[in-house]
Amino acid sequence: MKIYTRRGDDGSTALGSGARVSKDSPLPEAYGAVDEAQAVLGLVRAEAGGELAELVEQLERDLWRVMGELAGAARGDGVTPEMVTQLEAQIDSLSVRFEMPQEFVVPGENRVAALLDHARTVARRAERRALAAGVGGDALAYLNRLSDLLWVMARWQAGESLPSRD
């Protein structure tokens, strides 16, 4: 099987509906930013292990669903309200492990935390691109919550203000 089709040589790409649009139109910009966030999460997973790697892999798998929905290719397996609720539960679960910083955080405490902050900024861009493309609902809420979770994960990995275990 050949990976190239030559159909995009004119600068167009197909959406899930079969319609062809410019590769720099809003929807390809949105799902392209999600794809980039997923790739950065791949770097996190390659550096991490254990619980973090498992959590990141699930996020990577969820992002396939987000991209499919943005591309119009989701066939009954798009983003659900339960996926958003799951992100909120993960945020709550991780947030109790440390004291939240009271001022702006400078990324780079360690490599994994810095990569999580990078993934967060790409997820925020994906959210902005999705909004510009007219996307709303659960996909937009998922991207918003994802960036919150990535911020919390970065603080967790940076060891910010770990609570005492008296």
Image (cartoon, rainbow, N blue to C red):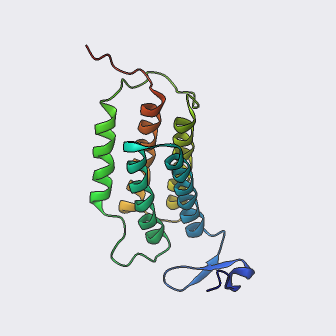
Q: Position of residue 62 (x, y in %)?
A: 40, 61
In the figure, residue 110 lies in which quadrant? top right
Q: Quadrant of the N terminus?
A: bottom right
Q: Quadrant of the C terminus?
A: top left
What residue do we see at 33% from left, 36% from top? 94
160 and 130: which is toward the camera: 160
Q: In the figure, is residue 139 to the left or right of 22?
A: left
**Residue 79's spot in the image, x, y percent?**
36, 64
The answer to whether 92 is drawn above or below residue 65 in the figure is: above
> At 56% across and 51% down in the image, what residue appears?
40
Q: Is residue 82 left or right of residue 60?
A: left
Count of labels shown? Answer: 0
Foreground residue, 151 or 159?
Answer: 159
- Residue farthest to the top? 166
- Residue 2 in view, yes or no: yes
Q: Is residue 6 above or below residue 130?
A: below
Can residue 132 be seen?
Answer: no
Percent across and percent down for residue 91 are 33, 41
How far from the left and from the top, in percent, is residue 132?
A: 54, 60
Q: Who's the residue at 36% across and 43% down the image?
A: 51
Q: Is residue 88 above or below residue 11?
A: above
Q: Residue shown at 53%/27% (left/top)?
A: 105
Q: Residue furthest right?
A: 10
